[in-house]
Amino acid sequence: MSEGPSGGRRLGYLEAIVAACLWGSSGIFAVHLFRMGVPPRSVALLRPVVGVLVLVAVFGVLRPASLRVSYTGLLVLGLGGGVAVGIFQLAYQLSTDAVGVPATVALLYLAPAVVAAAAGPLLGEWPTRTRATLVVVTLVGVCLSVAGAYDVPAAFGSAGLAWGALAGLSYAAYTLLGRFASPRYGSVPTVVYSTIGACVILTATLLSTEGAIELPATGTAWVLILVFGVTTIALAQFLFFDALARIEASRASLATAIEPVVAAVLATVLLDQGLRSVGWLGIVLVVAGVAGVGITGRRAGL
């Protein structure tokens, strides 16, 4: 196999890891915005709005041709991608508000197992026995890292459990959709039109249920929203969907399991949510699982 495709797969794996590192900061942004009085539903909408405005501005000026897509692609991305991304944004913020960052991340990482199970029948990407084992190792590591956090709630409320599980399932859904759509329509249209669709759906939902959208009341909160949207939507989403154009969905999804590592470290440093020994053992397992995917992939020529 030529170095070009191999290099493209290595780049895709690296892109997925960088995206996950950026997403690992999401809980820190969200918690600070909640403390500033910005409700979770508003954060769920404003974050992707900022991100997609940046993407449209950048690619509309530098690479306008990259935004072109067929009507079929627009429907698939705007509707299918919009529903998956919109549900994820809302569920993630409501779960973070209900049960905190560690518990939400634990539930979110139902996604790699769902993707690995579904990628075979849906995409024809059947995981090898080694890959399946690495999924188990990574999920055990995620559970241990969350269980080892000092501030994990003693019990999940039913609402928090439901929102967290929904975040994990919708995360898996748009991972699978991204793997299907990115090679066909391009990574730029996939992330842009999926996010635009999510913004439209979230706006309609909030206006119909809440009657209004509560905006940040301070300049500091607006700056935080801006940085939040640029780093975790505009940059991270583009990197992730570009990765899905290069590598299998199960591999990309497992690579993003580095996210709880970043989240745990940031929570320890910035939110005083330290980890016990079992938590750091979990982080070692997550890193081992992620590294193992890259090593086995190179040996198999995948």
Image: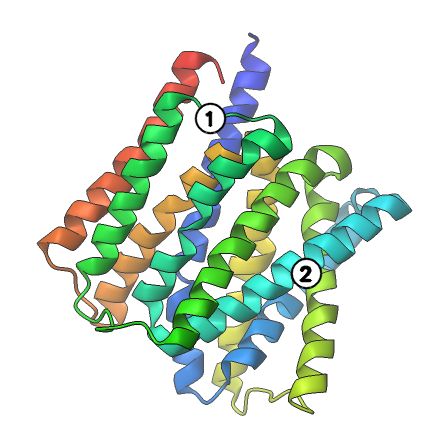
Secondary structure found at label 2:
helix
- Image coordinates of residue 110 in percent, x first then y, are 41, 50
Point 49% across, 36% down: residue: 117
- Image coordinates of residue 137 in percent, x first then y, are 28, 37
Q: Is residue 100 above or below residue 138?
A: below
Judge whether residue 246 can be spotted in this image: no
Label 1 packing within 10 angstroms: few (<14), some (14-19), many (20+): some
Whichever of callouts 1 and 2 sits on the residue coming sooner in the sequence is 2
Label 2 packing within 10 angstroms: few (<14), some (14-19), many (20+): many
Point 51% across, 90% down: residue: 218
What label does residue 127 carry, if any?
1
Q: Quick one: which residue is furthest to the right in this view?
A: 71
Secondary structure found at label 1:
loop
What label does residue 167 carry, if any?
none
Point 27% across, 65% down: residue: 267
Residue 156 located left or right of residue 164: left
Residue 166 located left or right of residue 287: right
User: Distance of mark 1 from mark 2, alpha carbons?
Assistant: 27 Å
Judge whether residue 85 can be spotted in this image: yes
Q: Quick one: which residue is furthest to the left in this view?
A: 277
Q: Nearer the viewer, residue 233 or 299?
A: 299
Residue 252 located left or right of residue 140: right
Quadrant the N terminus occupies: top right
Whether the residues at callouts 1 and 2 have beta carbons within 8 Å, the answer is no
According to the picture, the residue beneath numbered tag 2 turns out to be 83
- Image coordinates of residue 196 in percent, x first then y, are 73, 62
Q: Is residue 232 above or below residue 141?
A: below
Tag 2: amino acid = Val
Residue 234 located left or right of residue 28: right
Q: Nearer the viewer, residue 266 or 218?
A: 266
Tag 1: amino acid = Pro
